[in-house]
Image (cartoon, grey):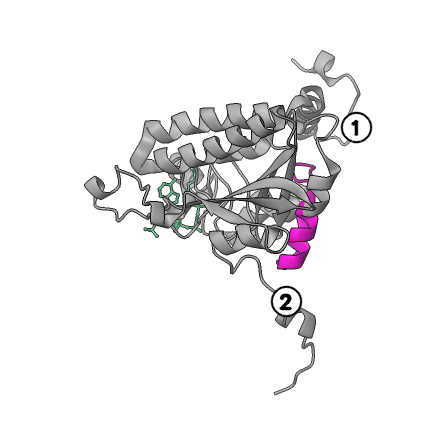
Amino acid sequence: MSNEGYNARFINRQSFIELDARERAKALFDAGTSRELLGPFDRVESPWLAMQGVTPQEDDGCVVMKGKIAGQAAVVVALEGAFQGGSIGEVSGAKMTAALDLACADNEKGIRTSAVILLETGGVRLQEANLGLAVIAELMASILALRKHAPVICLTAGTVGCFGGMSLAAGLASYVVMTREARLGMNGPEVIEQENGVEEFDSSDRALIWAIHGGEQRYATGLADALVGDDTPQVANAVRHLVSKGVPPVHRSSQVALYRNRNCEARYVAAVGSQRVPRTLDNEWI
Ligand code: COA
């Protein structure tokens, strides 16, 4: 067997995707500075899963850690994609928003504290329905409050990706970091296929899914700020860099005119089949 093409650097890399949520969170902190808050031994689990025949997890699939990143105070919240698809429920959501609110309170006291949210999630936990939806609203409010003071960084590495209401939370982040393997979108492929049929979206077509939701696509279209390899030091470096960079002058979600114009240009090109894109499309579009 030939070893032609053998890439030692790739084989020996420290994969980030292969880490679980707890290991991922820990890997982002300056060495020896992290500690977990409300961990599994505190046994705060979802009260709703057992009654639906689902075994709960004693951290509800949400890891909260506090420590230092690039020498500054930071909180990392990591969703465990292997537990119920990383979906967000009442307890995991309360842990997440409480952590962000405490970080916000620290900032108001003059202790600059950034937040990193590791999103591997199918969105609202279907078994907790409205409670999960309420969490999304609370989470968005917490991100908006915190991002005035310090960066809120959302990181999606894979393999679940970030979908549903949690993609809205990612949209509010100061920065979004993705790997090539990650996916980011509002409706998951299965949901689009289920609602609109396989002609609309074939959820078994992996090339199609990554061409639309994939990390490279999101980075190229400006919906992600950094594209990193599946390599733990590279991911940690990107996060350190963004924590040090601080709050962006304008958040992506405030650039309404930019994205509205871009959307309008795309619709115009699709409609008239021309690459000629006038500046004032709004005036021409009926
Ligand atoms: N609530 C509860 N469970 C969920 C979930 C959710 N929101 N999202 C995923 N899961 C579960 C799946 O049921 C599955 O459970 P199982 O292993 O017991 O069968 C597990 O997580 C893994 O999901 P699966 O679909 O097998 O993995 P995948 O990698 O192929 O796809 C997603 C992951 C997230 C892309 C896909 O599950 C999806 O499209 N989900 C819907 C996303 C969405 O549109 N959410 C909107 C809700 S607001």
Q: Nearer the viewer, residue 192 or 227?
A: 227
* Quadrant assignment for ligand 1: top left
Residue at horizontal 45%, vertical 52%? 204
Question: What percent of the width, then of the height, locates residue 174?
Answer: 65, 32
Residue 181 is covered by the magenta coloring: no
Q: Amino acid at mark 2?
A: Arg
Question: What percent of the width, then of the height, locates residue 33?
Answer: 59, 50
Query: Is residue 3 placed above or below 275 in the rendered structure?
Result: below
Which corner quadrant holds the C terminus? top right
Query: Is residue 251 placed above or below 203 in the rendered structure?
Result: above
Residue 68 occupies which quadrant of the picture?
top right
Residue 224 is covered by the magenta coloring: yes
In this picture, residue 40 sits left or right of residue 182: left
In this picture, residue 283 sits left or right of residue 130: right
In this picture, residue 150 sits left or right of residue 141: right
Residue 13: numbered disc? 2
Q: Which residues are magenta?
A: 221-239
**Is the C-beta of the residue carrying label 2 under 8 Å from the nearest atom of ligand 1?**
no
Res. 117 visible in picture: no
Residue 159: numbered disc? none
Q: Secondary structure at mark 1?
A: loop
Q: Residues within 10 Å of mark 2 (few under 14, many from 20)?
A: few
Q: Amino acid at mark 1?
A: Arg
Residue at horizontal 58%, vertical 53%? 181
Which corner quadrant holds the N terminus? bottom right
Q: Report the residue marked by disc 1.
A: 276
